[in-house]
Structures are given as structure tokens and as C-alpha cells.
Image (cartoon, helix red, strand yellow):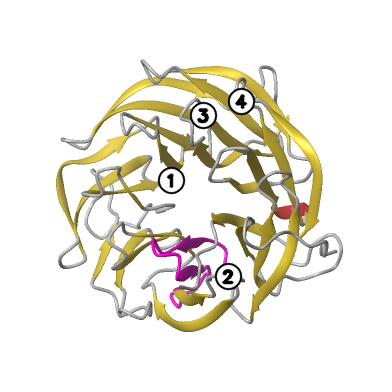
Amino acid sequence: MHNSNSIDPDSAYLVYVGTYTDLVGPAGRKSEGIYVYRMDPETGRLTYASVAPDIVRPSFLALHPSGRYLYAVNEVADPGGGVTAFAVDPQSGRLTFLNQQLSHGSATCHLTVDATGRFVLAASYSSGNVVVLPLADDGRLLPASDIVQHVGAHEAPGAPKAARAHMIIQDPTRRLALAPDLGLDQVLVYQFDAAHGKLLPHATPRVSVQAGAGPRHLDFHPSGQYAYLINELDATLIAYAYDSAEGRFQALQTVSTLPEGYAGNKSCADIHVAPSGRFVYGSNRGHDSIVIFAIDPGTGRLTLVGHELTQGKTPRNFGIDPRGKFLVVGNQDSDSLVVFRIDPETGKLSPTGEVVEVPAPVCIKFQIPHSSS
């Protein structure tokens, strides 16, 4: 049910929730599209605001740097995958459909808006490719300016593609684009040409991980000196020192995301470094938990803090609010958003008691409301 208690609109965060619109959850409901909530920045309480309906599988979301536009993938299995653009009402957060473009891939599962606000970069899982879509001045998507097929370093020409592009983001300098590929067990590194919307070869074209690890999502420390990669298949997290001048990753440490002795299903999904830079969090599907590590600011190395059960099934993505006070988990297979308070000293999570029903939640994005002036 929707929480309808009011929250001061001037101080509340906007929270956008991407979903799978074709799954029927435990309560027998199917998602209507992208859900918009308000969040009280002091209590973590969520209030339903609106929904953008009739969008096919808008699983992953990205906000424009201006806050005026939101983009969603359309994660469909056939080659007709795409990206949809919305205008954002600056106060209510309500989404208005603008247009769609093909992603030239299947199962498009992740996207990001570049720092200049002029391009959307998207990754397609099943087809193993990445795409750059230019943006018009009014936020609409234009046809692709570049399409790059991932290929393994030793893949023979004409061989079946093993690539499974799972994410594409920019590094802290915004000069490079990084794409973890679960199938290739690599993070592919591109120079991003922001003048022409092109992904160009880089001197260090790929970062390889342990075979079978399945790299999925990557996040950077606020200092830009460290990066953290979560691996879906072997449930590990790798800490790297990052050389932004060269775009090079030096592995510092590999740690398990699961409790010692756990022998059940394992499948990691998402990773986020806290805004403070003191902690990093990862989601465990199967164990249905968030793993918490403390980050040594001098070395980037990790120390296990513990695990917090997500009070639901299959924690897919999660979000941390801009001030680092709350963590919101989307439990995909139990149709729930669950809010946890973050202890600023220990990094531990404690449930606030706030649980909201949302069908098949996948992605959670926060935004501070913009004034209309």
C-alpha cells in the first residue's frame, strides 16, 4: 500500500524507483512503471507521489545533472531494447514522457548520463555491447553516435559472443568510460570523446578479474583514488587503487561478500560507497543481505563490519541518500522498499521500520528537489 502521510515538499528528497513491469509479485500485483516517492531526510519516511505508467521494463534509471530529465532503460530481451527520456517536474518530481531511442542491444540493463549532460551511455547485457546516445537541448534522446561491441581479448573472429555488458560509468575525471562485463570477466576501459560522443580505445583497454567472477557493478571512492568492483557470480568484492591519469587499476584486496560458512545460493548485484567515503556496501541475492565494509582512507583496503538482512527477497539495487544517513533497498522478489539508517561512526545499518510495497523494484535514485525558478 502507498504511504500517504504528508512530508514537507521543500525539504524532502525525491526517490525514483525503476521496476520490471512484466513480473507478478507475491501480492499478485504488476508494476505500473516508474514510481516516484518523497523521502523525509530526517526520518527516512517515504510518501508516494506519482507513477509514470505504460513504460516497458524501465529497470534502471539515471538522472540528468541538471535534475530536469530522467532516463530509463527498456530491458527487453529482443534487439528492440531501448532508452526512454522523461522531463522531471522540478518540485513534484512527476515524470512526463519525452521520447525513446533504440539502444541497438538486447536486455539493456544500465545507463548513465555523462558529466556534461550531453550524452547517455548505456550497456546491454544479452548482446554484450555499449552505446552512446546524444541529447538534444530539450532533454530528448537522439540516435546513437557510437555503438561498441565487447569482444574478449582472445576471442576468435566469428566465434559466439560471450560478452555480457552489465554497466557503463565515467571515472571521476570524466575522461574515461568503464564497462564491467560479466561474461568476459573484465572491466573494459574507453576514452570518452565528449565532443563527438565516441568511445575510443584506451592505452589500458581492459582490467581482468578471476575467471568466473562475473564483474557486475563498480563504484569510486569520493577521493577518486580507489575503486570497488562487485562480482556477481563468485560473490566477491575487489578493492583497487585507481590511477586517474593513466586509467589504471591496481588490485589491493579481494574479499567475500558472504558470511563465513554460508553455502546457499549466491549472486551479488549492486555496490555503493557511502558519501563519507568511510564505508562501502554491496547487495547479496540468495543470502538476502547488505554486506558492510569499512574503508581505510589511507590505503583503500577493506575491513568487514558485518551483514544486515534486507527483510525481503532478492535485494537488487539499493540507494544511499545524498547525506549518507539512509540506505534504501529494493527487494525485487518480495515487492518491497526497506529503509535502513546508517550509523555514521560504524557504518552499521538499522531498520527504521519503513517498508513500502512496490512491485518488482530494481533501481533506486535520489534527487534533491530543484526550485522552479
Is residue 81 visible to us here? no
Residue 131 placement (x, y as % from top left): 31, 65
Instruction: Give 282 or 188, whichever is nearer the viewer.
Output: 282
**Residue 244's image quarter?**
top left
Mark in the foreground, 2 or 1:
2
Residue 127 placement (x, y as % from top left): 40, 63
The answer for how far apart the CA atoms under marks 3 and 4 are is 19 Å
| Residue farthest along the left direction in this orientation | 203
Q: Which residue is mark 3?
A: 236
- Magenta-highlighted residues: 58-82
* Residue at x 46% of width, y 76% of height: 85
* Residue at x 74% of width, y 39% of height: 310
Q: Which mark is residue 347?
A: 4
Where 21 falls versus 332 (above or below)?
Answer: below
Is residue 79 visible to us here? yes
Residue 184 placement (x, y as % from top left): 36, 45
Residue 331 placement (x, y as % from top left): 71, 50
Instruction: Give 22 or 239, whichever is nearer the viewer.
Output: 239
Considering the numbered disc 1 on the image, is that residue within a helix, a strand or a loop? loop
Does the stretch in magenta take in 135? no
Q: Residues within 10 Å of mark 3 (few under 14, many from 20)?
A: many
Q: Which residue is mark 1?
A: 182
Query: Along the horizontal axis of the image, is 263 left or right of 222?
Result: right
* Residue at x 41% of width, y 64% of height: 64
Tag 3: amino acid: Thr
Mark positioned earlier in the residue sequence (3 or 2):
2
The answer for how far apart the CA atoms under marks 3 and 2 are is 40 Å
Q: Residues within 10 Å of mark 2 (few under 14, many from 20)?
A: some
Q: Which residue is mark 2?
A: 91
Tag 1: amino acid: Leu
Where 272 falls versus 294 (above or below)?
Answer: below
